[in-house]
Amino acid sequence: MQKIGIIGAMDMEVALIKDALEGVQQTEVAQSTYYIGRLGGHQVVLTCCGIGKVNAAISAQVLCSVYGVDCIINTGIAGNLAADLKLGDVVLAQKVLYHDFDPDIFAQCPPHQKVLLPDSGLCDRIAAGLTALGANFRRGVVATGDEFVQSSQRKADIIARTGADCAEMEGAAIGHVAARNGVPFAVVRCLSDDADDAAESTYENFAAHTAQLGARLLIDVIRGL
């Protein structure tokens, strides 16, 4: 049995997962609530960290230091950067990086990497679960920055610099902390908008739906791990 840490940034990204946990107990650390329960034969520690890199990093470190998780999975929604993906598709990170942090400067500090690499074994198991569920997903590049990308110009800039398939606000920070602690991690993101000039209205219409879709997929994947 693994102890799996799960982090989502918003309530709508974790609500269904919380409801699926059995024997739930909750504690509070640094003004965030951690839900401890069982899912599919595994112990799960779930939290809603809040939006942005610092909030995500705080919760990831708590999962490592306080709860001693065996791995961390970041779940949630993201802006689509890939022309051949559509809303509701999933990006399972093969690489995670910051799009708002000079990679040469980032590499000067531990873990001394320009990009962060999710655990291949964990991701293989998640990919197998997504395949069994018939999900349309890609093992791709996730770009993290402290902004909601809602400009076609900004989108093009991020793609040109990173080659990313989606943009979000927490994944690299969680991967950063996991790497510093030697804890395997994965980032699984369901696409909620196209990160373009229409992103705000698209997000308003589809964010809740895609957040729930991503949560349902992760629940079934963990049950099969």
Image (tube, rainbow, N blue to C red):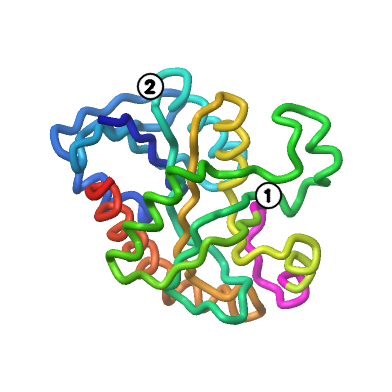
At x 39%, y 40%, the residue is 6
> x, y percentage for residue 71?
42, 34
Give the residue drawn at x 80%, y 62%.
161
Position of residue 92 relative to residue 121, above or below, is: below
User: Going by the image, does 70 lie left or right of 24?
Assistant: right
2 and 1 marks in contact (CB < 8 Å): no
| Mark 2 secondary-structure assignment | loop
Comparing 199 with 23, the one in front is: 23
Judging by the rendered image, the residue that carries numbered circle 1 is 97
Which residue of the protein is positioned furthest toward the right in this rendering? 104
Q: Is residue 27 above or below residue 150?
A: above
Which label is found at residue 67?
2
Q: Amino acid at mark 2?
A: Tyr
Residue 19: percent from left, percent from top: 20, 47
Q: Quadrant of residue 143?
A: bottom right
Residue 138 in magenta? no
145 part of magenta stretch: yes
Q: Which residues are magenta?
A: 144-155
